[in-house]
Image: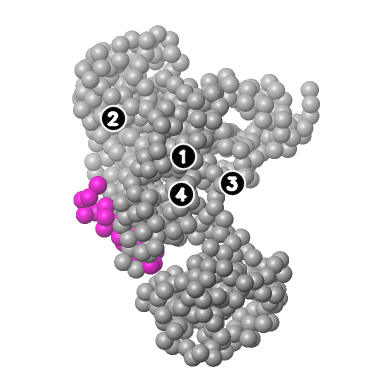
């Protein structure tokens, strides 16, 4: 047998019940450095987004009637990664806790047998966290002095007619539509139990479970609650009693993932339910800003109840003057800019006004300035212009106050403002990205452009993010490049769809490969929230319904999103 050090190390990690805020610090630290992440279907996109961007992401998500990858194959897969990747960090990411009906024990035994080192990282179990988010304590003095966690779904033994055959039409949702009449549960003792009963999984089996408990003597009036998608923005609580469980599931269309909690403590949920229905609760929004810029709007939208899928369409790279000619002279009425000799930062003394047209330009400029051994004193005596309030705020972070900010936060607005406030002899330096258009150069033909950063499209949409993006309610765009890259990336999924491995082909939407580019956009989302008229025009060109912020600020955009969903439209 090889030494443990010759293998990678496997971490069996509990992702918690869904809310990314409930992920443990230990789990977060491992995911950030993981080389491979093997994850289940119940792990939220927000948590997957915390993983090392360079990690190999392996979806082994299972559903009761369709196993994407069988458990025995998952066990072998973990051993395979460990053996083939010495000293690698392999994360096995599961919903809830890996040792609470998560089959983590089976995986651990396989690793032990293969001589692979492993570590268990416990997660917050949904059995306790989900009721808590619904205001239901699993124990309460005078009501329940114990609680019992029970699986409502086991290995298939023999099929019986689904709930539809017992109570009419029934849509069982993601958990499947078969039930098992021979669940190996001790119904007689469960019926006598005075504590709280918590069933994980098993919505499709719950009518049978409820009837068996009643047959064994449990009070038909026992309070019961189904809690769907607990701790997420889509959480819903449906109250019932033991005798009405089956009909309630049908009437309210209760679907998995959901837990069922029975007992007197359920009544406390009517008083203690604390999770508010925020303006954006139940909405899934795709934010397409560059990764380092998205955190601000993400936190605001999340605080308002939305589930945010951060899907940056572009990434930026600094362009250092020492690498190539960074200064470009402005040529009026021309889309081509002549490259001049590289200029050092000391040549900033030759300019009277520095004009920044984006937060990326601000960050890249100062990063290069500091790396070259200078500080903000080189800007002494110069006038500073900003295209808008967001860029102005970013400059203030570096201790720089702006002298010129147009009311119309566009390149045209900035150009017209500078035309009116500066003299012909003023020398203007435009600090922009490589994709900036010639609007400012045409309005300020004597200005000089310095390309301080490059904008590059993100190469590919990760598989784990594709389904989340397709099911989103809307997309948030902050630039025309984000719109164009989003449409291109989503359209390319049609091609990649047909090239995927046959191992996973039966889990993909067969209609996806038949879609036109316009249809693909509509499938992903047909509503877009935009900053600025140019972004709006680009989104409309590709068939999006557009809602545009009144001002080119994130505050204004967030306000517009809330207004849209709280005025009743599409709520």
Q: Is residue 388 left or right of residue 99?
A: left
Q: Is residue 380 left or right of residue 263?
A: right
Q: Nearer the viewer, residue 197 or 154?
A: 154
Picture layout, residue 47 above or below residue 364: above
Label 3 neighbourhood size at 10 Å, few (<14), some (14-19), many (20+)? some
As measured in the structure, the alpha-carbon distance from the residue carrying label 2 to the one carrying label 4 is 34 Å
Q: Nearer the viewer, residue 553 or 50?
A: 553
Q: Give the total number of marks visible in the rendering.
A: 4
Where residue 68 appears, as percent x and y from the top left, is 50, 24
As measured in the structure, the alpha-carbon distance from the residue carrying label 4 to the one carrying label 1 is 12 Å
As measured in the structure, the alpha-carbon distance from the residue carrying label 2 to the one carrying label 1 is 25 Å
- Which callout, 1 or 3, points to the residue nearer the camera? 1
Magenta range: 552-571
Q: Residue furthest front?
A: 333
Secondary structure state at the residue bearing disc 2: loop
Picture layout, residue 307 above or below residue 506: below
């Amino acid at each position: 047998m090889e030494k443990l050090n010759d293998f990678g190390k496997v971490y069996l990690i509990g992702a918690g019940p869904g809310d990314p805020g409930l992920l443990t610090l230990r789990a977060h630290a491992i995911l950030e450095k993981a080389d491979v992440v093997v994850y289940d279907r119940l792990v939220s996109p927000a948590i997957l987004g915390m993983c090392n961007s360079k990690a190999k992401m392996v979806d082994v998500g299972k559903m009761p009637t369709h196993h994407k990858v069988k458990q025995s194959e998952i066990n072998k897969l973990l051993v395979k990664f460990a053996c083939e990747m010495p000293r690698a960090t392999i994360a096995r990411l599961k919903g809830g806790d890996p040792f609470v009906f998560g089959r983590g024990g089976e995986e651990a035994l396989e690793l032990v047998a293969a001589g692979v080192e492993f570590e268990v990282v416990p997660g917050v179990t949904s059995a306790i966290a989900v009721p808590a988010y619904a205001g239901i304590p699993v124990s309460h003095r005078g009501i329940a002095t114990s609680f019992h966690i029970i699986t409502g779904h086991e290995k298939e033994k023999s099929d019986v007619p689904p709930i539809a055959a017992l109570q009419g039409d029934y849509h069982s949702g993601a958990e499947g539509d078969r039930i098992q009449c021979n669940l190996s549960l001790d119904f007689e003792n469960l019926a006598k139990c005075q504590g709280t009963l918590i069933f994980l999984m098993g919505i499709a089996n719950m009518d049978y479970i409820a009837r068996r408990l009643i047959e064994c003597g449990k009070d038909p009036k026992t309070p019961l609650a189904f809690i769907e998608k607990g701790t997420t923005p889509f959480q819903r609580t449906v109250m019932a009693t033991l005798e009405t469980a089956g009909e309630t599931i049908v009437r309210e269309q209760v679907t998995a993932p959901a837990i069922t909690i029975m007992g007197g403590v359920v009544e406390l949920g009517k008083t203690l339910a604390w999770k508010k229905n925020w303006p954006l609760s139940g909405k899934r929004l795709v934010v397409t800003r560059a990764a380092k810029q998205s955190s601000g709007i993400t936190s605001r939208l999340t605080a308002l109840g939305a589930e945010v899928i951060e899907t940056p369409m572009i990434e930026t790279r600094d362009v250092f003057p020492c690498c190539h000619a960074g200064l470009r002279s402005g040529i009026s009425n021309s889309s081509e800019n002549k490259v001049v000799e590289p200029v050092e930062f000391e040549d900033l003394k030759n300019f009277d006004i520095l004009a920044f047209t984006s937060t990326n330009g601000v960050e890249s400029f100062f990063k290069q300035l500091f790396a070259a051994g200078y500080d903000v004193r080189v800007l002494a005596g110069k006038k500073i212009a900003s295209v808008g309030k967001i860029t102005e705020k970013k400059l203030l972070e570096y201790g720089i106050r702006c002298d010129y900010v147009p009311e119309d936060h566009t390149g045209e607005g900035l150009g017209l403002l500078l035309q009116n406030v500066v003299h012909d002899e003023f020398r203007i330096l435009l600090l922009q990205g490589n994709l900036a258009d010639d609007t400012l150069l045409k309005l300020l033909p004597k200005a000089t452009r310095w390309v301080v950063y490059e904008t590059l499209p993100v190469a590919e949409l990760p598989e784990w993010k594709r389904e989340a993006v397709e099911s989103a309610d809307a997309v948030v765009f902050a630039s025309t490049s984000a719109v164009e890259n989003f449409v291109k990336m989503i359209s390319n999924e049609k091609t990649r769809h047909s090239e995927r491995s046959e191992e996973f082909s039966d889990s993909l939407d067969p209609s996806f490969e038949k879609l036109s580019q316009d249809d693909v956009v509509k499938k992903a989302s047909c509503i877009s929230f935009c900053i600025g008229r140019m972004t709006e025009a680009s989104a409309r060109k590709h068939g999006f319904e557009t809602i545009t912020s009144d001002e080119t600020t994130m505050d204004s955009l967030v306000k517009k999103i809330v207004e849209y969903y709280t005025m009743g439209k599409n709520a």
